[in-house]
Image (cartoon, rainbow, N blue to C red):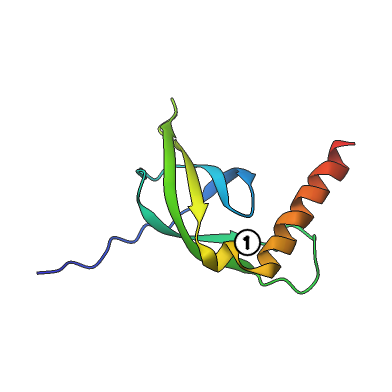
Amino acid sequence: SDSPPRILVGPGIVRDLSISGAWLITKHQLVPGKRIIIAIPTQRFAVADCLPAMFIGPAEVVRTKPDAESRVWVGVRFGDALTQNMEFAAFIQGLHSLREALAK
């Protein structure tokens, strides 16, 4: 019998974010090639008006690196639902501009 896919829900701490992917830390034991759905909240970052509360889209795990604290560093590549989304591109650009402003 076909069992339903296992659904893992939980946070990750994003360390780097671009229009094409992210580098994050999670407790989930993900492996390269695994396809996931990622949700990126926008409320904490006032970088643009009229953004959705979160961006949700497919991603593929492309790299993993366990650390000494039972966490995993994970590199993901976003699917077209995010990379081709102009609002998401504006959000990412806003985050990068905010980071540059705070670094001064």
The picture places residue 37, in percent across and down from the top left corner, at 45, 62
Q: Please, what is the three-letter code of the amino acid marked with disc 1?
A: Pro
Residue 60, position as x, y percentages in the image? 43, 53
Vertical arrangement, residue 74 with respect to residue 82, above or below: above
> Where is residue 75 shown, x and y percent of the image?
49, 43
Where residue 4 appears, x then y in whole percent?
23, 68
Vertically, is 78 above or below 102?
below
Which residue does the image show at 56% across and 47% down from the upper left? 22
Count of numbered labels shown in the rendering: 1
Nearer to the camera, 37 or 60: 60
**Residue at figure coordinates x 52%, y 48% from the top left:** 12
Quadrant where the N terminus is found in the figure: bottom left
User: Which residue appears at 75% of the width and 52% of the height?
Assistant: 95
Horizontal arrangement in the rendering, residue 6 relative to residue 68 (left or right): left
In the image, farthest residue toward the left: 1
Q: Residue at x 83, y 42 (%)?
A: 100
Q: Quadrant of the C terminus?
A: top right
Q: Quadrant of residue 32?
A: top left
Q: In the displayed orientation, state which residue is furthest to the right.
A: 104
* Front one among 45 and 101: 101
Give the residue number, with chain letter if any, for mark 1. Answer: 41
From this view, report whether residue 76 is shown above or below residue 80: above
